Amino acid sequence: MINKRAMGFTLITVIFALAILAIGILSILGLFPLGHKAVNRSKAMTISALIAEKELNRIRGLYSAFDSPDPPEEMFGFEPDFPKFSWKAIISGKEIYTVELEVSWEEERKKKYESFTTEFTKH
């Protein structure tokens, strides 16, 4: 003879376990957009660091030689490989030049930027 009471309890247990499983899966799926956003932000910061390194080295190379002209107070440009990114450099100083470079881009309809600074002298 089959115990009807035990079968009902087992069915309720299975339904309860499935509900807990569904809540867990939905919670995990909710993390994917956050992870995607973090990956995009990290990618943008990496690209901005690459652009800054390239431009800072270029500025230092153009104006650090003893016989090179004095650098302009301001420079700006766009990166052809990364069209969403632009940069602006402010150069100050006389014997020791300070370069403050800002790389900007648009992310989720908001302007984002990273700042980088270096110094160089003529030699």
Image: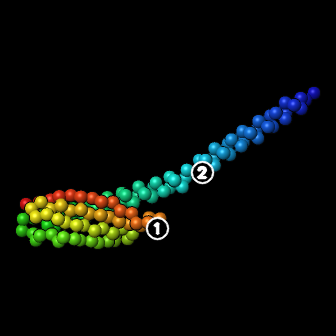
In the image, residue 29 sits, relative to residue 6, either above or below, namely: below
Query: Which residue is painted at 40% across and 66% down in the image?
Result: 111
Residue 80 on image: x %, y %:
34, 71
The amino acid on which the numbered mark 1 sits, given as a three-letter code, is Arg
Q: How far separated are the C-alphas under marks 2 and 1?
A: 25 Å
Quick check: can you spot residue 109? Answer: yes
Tell whether 58 sits left or right of 48. Answer: left
Residue 55 on image: x %, y %:
25, 65
Q: In which image quadrant can residue 3 be found?
A: top right
The amino acid on which the numbered mark 2 sits, given as a three-letter code, is Leu
Q: In which image quadrant can residue 98 be found?
A: bottom left
Residue 16 on image: x %, y %:
74, 39
User: Disc 2 designates what residue?
Assistant: 29
* Crowd rating for badge 2 (residues with CA inside 10 Å; few <14, some 14–19, many 20+): few
The C terminus lies in which quarter of the figure?
bottom left
Query: Which residue is painted at 30% across and 68% down in the image?
Result: 87
Tell whether 3 sits left or right of 10. Answer: right
User: Disc 1 designates what residue?
Assistant: 109
Observer-side mark, 2 or 1, equals: 1
